[in-house]
Image: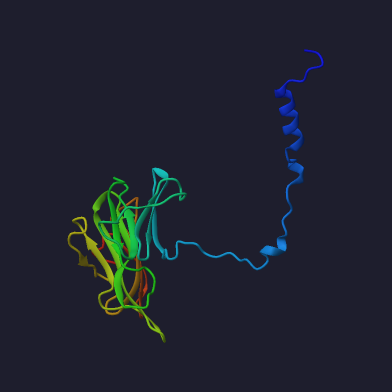
Amino acid sequence: VPGVVSSNALAQRTRAATAPSAATSPSVDSTRFASLSYRLLGPFRGGRSTAVTGLADEPHTFLMGSTGGGVWKTDDAGTTWKNITDGFFGGSIGAIDVADSDPNVIYVGTGSADVRGNSSTGAADLAMNPRNPRVLYAGMWRTERKPWTNISGGPEGGIYKSTDGGDTWSKLAGGLPTGMVGKVGVTVSPANPDRVWAIVEAEPEGGVFRSDDAGKTWT
């Protein structure tokens, strides 16, 4: 009706007149925050990552071995991780390997891959025959860190082999260093699984060694 203002229209005009403007937001005195500093909220202890491997056919899938935290798995290239060993075993992980023939077959070597403050012997490296996941090679390392020195090596160190999926192991010789053996790395040729390479810390016989008969003899 001409000359008559409805109550709805009047209410809308009142709200528009009293609504705060976005351009006039309250100012903040930054000097009030000068004494504040960032602090860690957690997690407070995650340990180190001492072993890692991936799946050739799944480029976003990786397994990680941690110090004191067991084995973790990601299938989104590291965005999220899930522990897969809780309830089975834990502790420090020194080596991980996955069977090329079956990614469901995973072998884990326990023991720290780095020098720690206590004496320990564990698997510093682990390799698998790509054609037969029951054939394994483990580089065993005894190490100890004291306040005044580092100790690397012991008579139990060296390369061990299993042909039954890890149920039993035998120490390899046939040209490898004997006596005090330190840190050991080992790998198997994907083209010829009878060819095995090893890098062995030993004095004075350390170096790089090769076997062409699945670890029976070394040069």
The C terminus is located in which quarter? Answer: bottom left
Q: Does residue 30 appear left or right of residue 172 in this picture? A: right
Residue 122 percent coordinates (x, y): 29, 69
Q: Residue at x 73, y 50 (%)?
A: 26
Task: Name, please, the residue furthest toward the bottom.
Answer: 148
Q: Nearer the viewer, residue 58 or 75?
A: 75
Q: Does residue 106 appear left or right of residue 44 in this picture? A: left
Q: Residue at x 24, y 68 (%)?
A: 172
Task: Name, please, the residue furthest toward the top.
Answer: 1
Q: Nearer the viewer, residue 102 or 176?
A: 102
Q: Is residue 110 visible?
A: yes
Residue 135 percent coordinates (x, y): 24, 55
Task: Name, please, the residue furthest toward the right.
Answer: 3
The N terminus is located in which quarter? Answer: top right
The number of callouts visible is 0
Q: Is residue 187 visible?
A: no
Residue 66 percent coordinates (x, y): 38, 62
Say which quarter of the image contains residue 209: bottom left
Is residue 48 depicted above or below 2 in this figure? below
Is residue 11 depicted above or below 58 in this figure? above
Q: Nearer the viewer, residue 5 or 105?
A: 5
Residue 109 percent coordinates (x, y): 29, 62
Q: Residue at x 31, y 46 (%)?
A: 103
In this figure, which colouring scheme has been used for the structure?
rainbow
Is residue 145 depicted above or below 69 in this figure? below
Say which quarter of the image contains residue 208: bottom left
Q: Nearer the viewer, residue 200 or 17?
A: 17
Q: Residue at x 69, y 64 (%)?
A: 32
